[in-house]
Amino acid sequence: MQILFLITALAAASLVYSKLVTVSELLQEGNRLQASGQYKAAEASYREALGLLEQSGSKGVELAKAQSNLGVALYGQGRYGDAEELYHRALRSWKESSEQGAESGLASTLNNLGALHKAQGRYHDAEKAYRGAIEVREKNGESESEPMATLLSNLAEVYRKQLRLDEAKTEVDRARSMLETIQKEPNALYAGVLHTSGDVYSDRNQLEEAERFHKRALTIRENLFGPRHPTVAASKNNLSHIYVLQRRMDLVEPLLLDARSIWRETLGERHPTMASVLNNLAQHYRMQGRRMEAEPLYRQAIEIWELSLGPEHPDVASGYKNLGDLFMEQDKLRGAEKLYQRAISILEKAYGERNEQLDVLLKALSVTLQMQGRLVEAEKLRSQLPGMAFR
C-alpha cells in the first residue's frame, strides 16, 4: 500500500509538472503570436493555458499572467468588454499573490486596463489606472525604467485626448528622454513613445518634429516586425495625417491604403482601428473633391465605431462631424444639422465642459442654421463662442 501511494504521488507530481511546462510553453507561444499581431491565434494559446491552470486549481503569478495576456489578445481584436473582464480577474489574482513579480505584474495589468479605458473614451478611468500603475512602479523602485517610460507615454496620450497638450508634451518628453538614457538599441517600446510624441507634437502644430518622430517609429517597427505588422500600419496612418496638415497630398493616399490593407489582414474588417483608417481615407477623398467615394467610407467608420466602442464614444462624434462637413459641401443642410447635433451631444457627455472640439462643432452648427435662414437660432449659438458674432 505504501509503495502504491508513493507511485500515485509521483504520478500526480509528474502530471502537475507536465502541466506547468505546458502552460509555460503555451504562454510563450501566445506572447510570440501576439508580438507578431496574430491576436486570434494568441487568444487560443492563452485560453488553453488558462484552462489548464484553472483545471489544476492553480493560483498566483501564472494564473494572473494567463488572464492578463488573454485580455491583451482580446483587446487587440477590439473585444473590449471581454478584455476588461479578464483584466479585472488578473488584478484580483495579482493582489492575492505574494510571489516574486506580483507587484510588477499588477502594474502591467493596470497599464493594460488604462489602454482599454482610453480606447473606450473613458479618459478619467484611464488616467486613474495609469496613475495607479505609476505608483506601483515607484514603490517597486522602477522610477527610471522602460515600464515607467511606457506609462508616462500612455498618460501623455490620455492628456492629448483630453486636449491637455502642455501636460501631454511634458510626460511624453520625459518618457522619450528616459528611454534614450536607458536603452542601447531602440526597441518596440521606444517606437511606441516616438509614435505618441508624433501625435502630441502634431496636435501642438509642431509638424516638422511630428514628422520626424513618426518616420523614426515607422523605421524601427519595420526593422523589428517586417512590413505587415499592425504597428507599421499605425505609423503609416498617423504619418499620413502629418502630410495632410503639410498639404503634401500626393504622399497621403499610398500610406492610407497600405495601412488599410495591413489592418484588414491582421485585425479584420470590424476592428475599431479599421474605422480610423477608413475615416482618414474618407477625409482625404473629400479634400480632393472625391465626395462620392468619401461618403460610404465615413458611414462604414461610424458603424464600426458604434458597434465596437458604443454610440457615445468621442470617435463616433468625430465621424458624425466629418460626415456633417461632407453634407454641408453637398448642400444637405438638414442632414448636416442632425449630424452636428448628435456629435455635440456626445462630446458634452464625454468631456463635461467646453473645449476646442465642441466649439468647432457649435460654430459649424451655427453656419448650418444661418444657411437655412434660421438667423435667430444661429446668432444664439454664435453668442456662446468668442469672437463669433454676426457681421
Image (tube, rainbow, N blue to C red):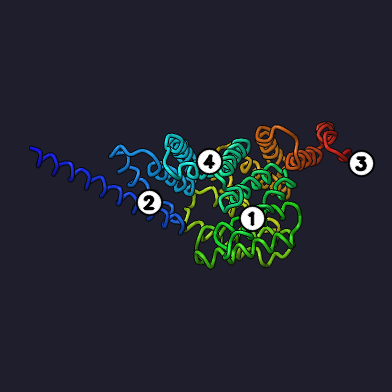
* Residue 285 percent location from the top left of the image: 66, 58
Q: CA gap, disc 3 to disc 1?
A: 52 Å
Disc 1 crowd rating (10 Å Cα; few below 14, some 14-19, many 20+) is many
Tag 2: residue type? Answer: Leu
Residue drawn 66% across the image and 66% down it = 251
Considering the image in quadrants, where does the C terminus appear?
A: top right
Where 338 falls versus 223 (above or below)? above
Comparing 149 with 117, the one in front is 149
Q: Which residue is mark 1?
A: 178
Q: Which residue is mark 2?
A: 27
Alpha carbon distance from label 2 to label 1: 29 Å
| Mark earlier in primary sequence (2, 1) | 2
> Which one is closest to the eye, mark 3 or mark 1?
1
Q: Nearer the viewer, residue 159 or 39?
A: 159
Q: Name the secondary structure under disc 2.
A: helix
Please state which amino acid type lies under the numbered disc 4: Leu
Task: Tell me the mark number nearer the camera, choosing from 2 and 3.
Answer: 2
Q: Which mark is residue 391?
A: 3
Contact flag, marks 3 and 1 (Cβ < 8 Å): no
In three-dimensional space, the C-alpha distance between marks 2 and 3, rounded to whole angstroms, equals 66 Å
> How far apart are labels 1 and 4 at the CA level?
21 Å
3 vs 4, front mark: 4
